[in-house]
Image: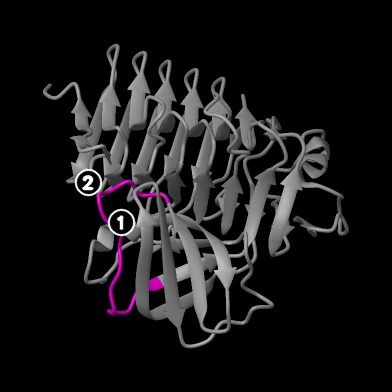
């Protein structure tokens, strides 16, 4: 087994995550060996995609710092659809640990007003000793708020692209295995400057990626990319049991293309940008996806299947709150029948 540590200041085993994986791709790895890449809390800026092409092992994991649990005493809301500000009040915040640029992860809520509209992955914009302020891009007609306790996690490890490039790509290889997910406790943040085709996590050319679950909360956030997460050219992704939350995608949230398959139980896909196609879960060219108890909201079209593709819902997804903009409701399913 081999462990590497990468710090935000360029120190540690490697100066950057892409540099570490350039070497990992050269290794011949024994069947039972694990490779773990531990990331320090903070923002890891990458100037090139993280590429995985090693065919000799799937036992590789990128692991962020441990998330921090909070329960609120109240949540206020201001702003308007697509740009809500939520101020979350808590008993105490260690401002040395929780900082601007980190992310809040929420799945499920007991807030008294629009509780679903805070589900997902939201960027922290301000921190005090008793408050955490987030930018919530849900485009419902009103934002979430309330005095009932809100349970949430702060994800302190961010992989952030320095330009409009892909975040992580797995090409013609398998990565992650049962109990050893490829990504854990990280948020992949895109450049966000355009609605181009760059993808947060892309698995392509007969590749496979396993993202493990966490029982109650997504362990991976993908935000501000043209496409959130995609499987292309007969590839597959297993992202079950609260593995991933995707938000603020420019075109597609979760996407399977050309004979590919995605299994996504309890996935959260929200706030796909209004000035693009805005598909939450999309399958094209004889592809398929299985979703279970998913939360799909604030997307122009929540579920879209085309050209011999199929999307199966093993249990009813939450697909109310289709995108509203200027009073026009979005689409829940396309096609609407069959």
- Which element type, helix, strand or loop, lies under badge 2? loop
Q: Quadrant of residue 338?
A: top left
Give the camera-side residue of 9 and 2. 9
Question: Residue 321: which disc?
Answer: 2
- Left or right, 120 with respect to 32, comes to left
Label for residue 117? Answer: 1
Q: Is residue 16 above or below residue 272?
A: below
Q: Is residue 179 left or right of residue 315?
A: right
Q: Position of residue 209 (x, y in %)?
A: 53, 38
Mark 1 Cα-neighbour bin, 10 Å: few <14, some 14–19, many ≥20: many
- Residue 278 or residue 51, whichever sits in front: 278
Secondary element at tag 1 = helix
Q: Which segment did they paint magenta?
A: 137-151
Along the line of sight, which residue is nearer the eye, 120 or 99?
A: 99
Report the Cα–Cα distance between label 1 and label 2.
9 Å
Q: Are marks 1 and 2 in contact (CB under 8 Å)?
A: yes
- Residue 194 among those drawn in magenta: no
The quarter of the rendered structure image containing the N terminus is bottom right
């Amino acid at each position: 087994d081999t462990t590497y540590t990468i710090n935000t200041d360029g120190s540690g085993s490697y100066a950057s995550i892409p540099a570490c994986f350039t070497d990992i791709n050269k290794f011949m790895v024994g069947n039972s060996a694990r490779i773990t890449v531990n990331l320090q809390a903070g923002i890891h800026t990458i100037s090139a995609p993280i590429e995985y092409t090693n065919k000799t092992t799937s036992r590789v994991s990128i692991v962020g710092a441990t998330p921090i649990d909070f329960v609120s005493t109240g949540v206020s809301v201001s702003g308007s659809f697509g740009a809500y500000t939520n101020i979350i009040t808590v008993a105490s915040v260690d401002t040395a640990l929780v900082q601007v640029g980190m992310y809040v992860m929420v799945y499920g809520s007991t807030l008294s007003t629009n509780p679903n509209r805070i589900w997902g992955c939201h960027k922290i914009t301000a921190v005090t000793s008793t408050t955490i302020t987030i930018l919530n891009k849900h485009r419902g007609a009103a934002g979430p708020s309330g005095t009932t306790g809100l349970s949430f996690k702060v994800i302190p490890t961010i992989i952030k692209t320095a330009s409009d490039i892909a975040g992580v790509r797995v090409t013609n290889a398998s990565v992650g295995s049962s109990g050893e997910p490829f990504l854990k406790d990280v948020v992949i943040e895109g450049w966000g400057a355009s609605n181009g085709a760059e993808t947060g996590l892309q698995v392509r050319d007969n590749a496979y990626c396993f993202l493990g679950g966490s029982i109650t909360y997504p362990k991976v956030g993908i935000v501000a990319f043209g496409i959130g997460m995609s499987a292309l050219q007969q590839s597959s992704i297993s992202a079950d049991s609260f593995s991933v939350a995707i938000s603020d995608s420019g075109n597609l949230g979760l996407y399977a293309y050309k004979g590919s398959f995605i299994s996504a139980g309890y996935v959260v896909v929200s706030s796909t940008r209004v000035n693009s196609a805005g598909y939450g879960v999309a399958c094209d060219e004889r592809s398929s996806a299985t979703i279970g108890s998913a939360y799909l909201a604030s997307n122009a079209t929540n579920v879209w299947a085309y050209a011999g593709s199929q999307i199966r819902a093993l249990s009813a997804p939450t697909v109310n709150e289709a995108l509203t903009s200027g009073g026009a409701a979005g689409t829940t399913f396309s096609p609407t029948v069959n």
